[in-house]
Image (cartoon, grey):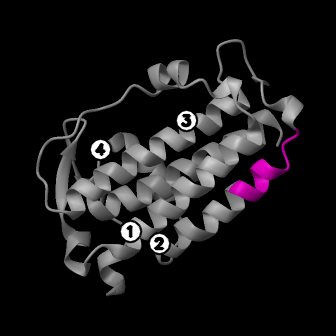
């Protein structure tokens, strides 16, 4: 893999909404960052006592379990988008309403351990997907949520999104 193909994407390769996610990813091979940050995330989740799973830091905020369910759903969606772009599929991909997904996911009926196990499997599949993509695919783009997005931006968005929620779990949920 040519390192420059996995280089941090230019701001023109993704919607402005994702800028914070992309810029939060440290320098380095984004696939290795996904692998390592997955371990960091799972280590942090593994320290959450089950009885805290329903904790919300505000009245309308997601519970810890709902945040974990959201991480699973979002990672699957970002990976699916990467798969489509990485296979040269130019079909525009729909947006998703993360709040509606959280409300219907049933995460609060699950254990933290179960959610963590699923998140670990999803992250491993994400890493394997990005590892398997041909070099030239890293420069390809598609459309998601009505905006142009590159494959490499999707890798950075996936990594940055999880980093964002880990920071929130630490700062606002006290994990």
Disc with the residue nearer the chain's start (4 vs 2): 4
Name the mark on residue 20.
none
| Residue that label 2 marks | 31
Indicate the position of residue 13 as horizontal and vertical percent values. 25, 56
Q: Which residues are magenta?
A: 42-49
| Residue that label 3 marks | 70
Gap in angstroms between the C-alphas marked 1 and 3: 21 Å
Indicate the position of residue 24 as horizontal and vertical percent values. 53, 57
Gap in angstroms between the C-alphas marked 4 and 1: 21 Å
| Mark 3 in CB contact with mark 2 (< 8 angstroms) | no
Front label number (4 vs 3): 3
For label 4, count other residues whose C-alpha is less than 10 Å away and answer few (under 14), some (14-19) or many (20+): some
Gap in angstroms between the C-alphas marked 2 and 1: 7 Å
For label 3, count other residues whose C-alpha is less than 10 Å away and answer few (under 14), some (14-19) or many (20+): many
| Mark 2 in CB contact with mark 1 (< 8 angstroms) | yes
Which of 120 and 172 lies nearest the eye of the viewer?
120
At 29% from the left and 44% from the top, the residue drawn is: 15
Magenta span main SS: helix
For label 1, count other residues whose C-alpha is less than 10 Å away and answer few (under 14), some (14-19) or many (20+): many
* Quadrant of the rendering where the C terminus is positioned: top right
Front label number (4 vs 2): 2
| Mark 4 in CB contact with mark 1 (< 8 angstroms) | no
Disc with the residue nearer the chain's start (4 vs 3): 4
| Residue that label 1 marks | 130
- Relative placement, left or right, of 26 versus 137 is right
In the rendered image, the vertical position of residue 158 relative to residue 87, given as above or below: above
Disc with the residue nearer the chain's start (4 vs 1): 4
Front label number (2 vs 1): 1
Residue 1 visible from this viewpoint: yes
| Residue that label 4 marks | 15
Question: On the image, which quarter does residue 18 sit in?
Answer: top left
At 25% from the left and 77% from the top, the residue drawn is: 134
């Amino acid at each position: 893999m040519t390192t420059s193909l996995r280089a941090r994407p230019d701001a023109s390769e993704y919607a402005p909404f994702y800028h914070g996610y992309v810029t939060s990813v440290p320098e380095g091979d984004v696939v290795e960052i996904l692998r390592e940050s997955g371990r960091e995330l799972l280590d942090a989740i593994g320290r959450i006592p089950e009885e805290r799973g329903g904790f919300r830091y505000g009245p309308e905020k997601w519970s810890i379990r709902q945040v974990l369910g959201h991480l699973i759903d979002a990672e699957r969606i970002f990976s699916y988008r990467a798969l489509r772009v990485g296979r040269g599929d130019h079909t525009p991909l729909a947006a998703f309403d993360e709040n509606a997904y959280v409300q219907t996911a049933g995460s609060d009926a699950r254990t933290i351990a179960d959610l963590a196990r699923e998140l670990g499997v999803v992250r491993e599949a994400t890493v394997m997907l990005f590892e398997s993509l041909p070099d030239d695919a890293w420069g390809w783009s598609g459309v998601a949520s009505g905006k142009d997005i590159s494959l490499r931006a999707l890798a950075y968005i996936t990594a940055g999104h999880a980093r964002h929620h880990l920071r929130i779990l630490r700062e606002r949920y006290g994990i």
